[in-house]
Image (spheres, rainbow, N blue to C red):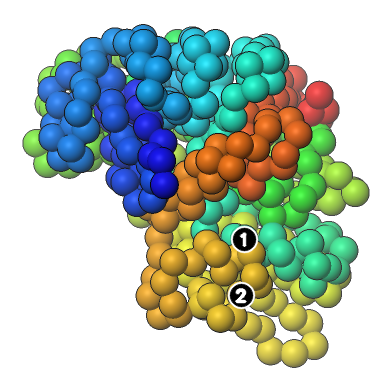
Amino acid sequence: MQPINVAVVGSGFMGAAHIDALRRIPGVNVMAISSIDRPRAAELAQQFAIPHVYDDWREILNHPEITAVHNCTPNNLHFEVNRALIEGGKHVLSEKPLTMTSEESAELIRLAREKSVATAINFNYRGYPLIQHAHGMVKRGELGDIHVVQGHYLQDWLLYDTDYNWRLESKISGASRAIADIGSHWCDLIQFVTGLKIKRVFAHLYTVHETRKKPKQEVETYKGKELGAPQEYDEVPIDTEDGGFVLMHFENGVHGNLTVSQVSAGRKNRQWFEIDGSRSAISWNQEEPNTLWIGHRDKPNEILIKDPSLMDANARTYAAYPGGHPEGYPDGPKNLFRNFYRYIREGKKPGQDPADFPTFEDGHWEVVVVEAILRSNEQQAWVDVA
């Protein structure tokens, strides 16, 4: 098998997670890493035997043997980096949100089609085996007609006013923080499982901490709550939301609601949904990803434990281990990356051959949904998702 050479841009939490997942994909070789934090990039390069380390991501464009690039930079750099990579003929897998505006994300789609490069966005929760099984259940009609969709995405890593991260700053993260950062995951996941697009939204967003104490020394994502975190601060105003409540109308008249919070004590990464249909219901919690609740009216409810022998044929390919052997967060992106590189290796054509992973088109749609939520919050009215 001829290896596919890959580069990763960014050395933070997600950059390291991408590299860790990529090393589990047969036939994929991480050749280079680029980051403005050279010591951290050098550390990752040594840890994962990556031969090239760059301060400037543009140097990757000069490597003809690098076929694809993973963009794990902060949000405000997504458009610039993705656009340059596409124009350079590289296949691109980007972190979300795809861009900070829908005009930018639409431009990336146009460019990618023009250059005929494969694109993907890291909506990694689609890669869980039981999510694929839930998708199959809905597609086969096992839930009947869907009536109600509900759920939440709760975290606590920004609970205190001393918690700080670049995502709090709109000039870096974009106009939305909690909704765009984690709410977009829930929206993508629920639309994937149900096969229904969000069409209208009514939103109320809130900010608990109007000001926060910004450490004079930069803190890595999720590290601020650890012992030894910086104790010298500057008081700064906050212009992004800590959470929100969103009512939704989906296609086919389905109703839904979503609660998002990054200030919920004890909730580390609780992404939960329930889908209620005319025949049965299903519920899934990301913190317990190896179980799927199946609800019934006229017989006992069920708990399906992740086991390839008990799941449908497609979901089975997402489970690398037999029943009783749990799989978790690192396995979602691994499955997504596997599909992406199989697509490239098989020479499939973007826009012609269907993809079994979330693409830039999916990333663009989530940017559009987030923009509609922001407009709804500002107007305090129902807003169509254009």
Mark 1 residue element: helix
Q: Is residue 125 visible?
A: no
Q: Is residue 221 above or below residue 259?
A: above
Mark 2 residue element: loop
Q: Earlier in the sequence, mark 2 or mark 1?
A: 1
Q: Give 253 or 69, whichever is nearer the viewer.
A: 69
Image coords of residue 344 (percent x, y): 55, 37
Q: Residue at x 49, y 21 (%)?
A: 90
> Dot 2 surroundings within 10 Å: few (below 14), some, or many (20 or more)?
many
Q: Which residue does the numbered mark 2 point to in the structure image? A: 311
Q: Is residue 134 visible?
A: yes
Q: Residue at x 86, y 44 (%)?
A: 251
Label 2 vs label 1: CA separation? 9 Å
Q: Give 60 or 190, whichever is nearer the viewer.
A: 60
Q: Residue furthest bottom?
A: 299
Q: Is residue 104 above or below residue 191?
A: above
Q: Is residue 324 above or below residue 259?
A: below
Image coords of residue 202 (percent x, y): 75, 34
Q: Give 173 or 328, whichever is nearer the viewer.
A: 328
- Kindly indicate whether the residue at mark 1 contacts the one at mark 2 (C-beta within 8 angstroms): yes
Image coords of residue 81 (percent x, y): 46, 14
Q: Residue at x 36, y 11 (%)?
A: 62
Is residue 214 toward the left or the right of residue 364 in the image? left
Q: Which residue does the numbered mark 1 point to in the structure image? A: 132
Is residue 374 toward the left or the right of residue 262 in the image? right
Q: In the rendered structure, which amino acid carries the disc numbered 2? A: Met
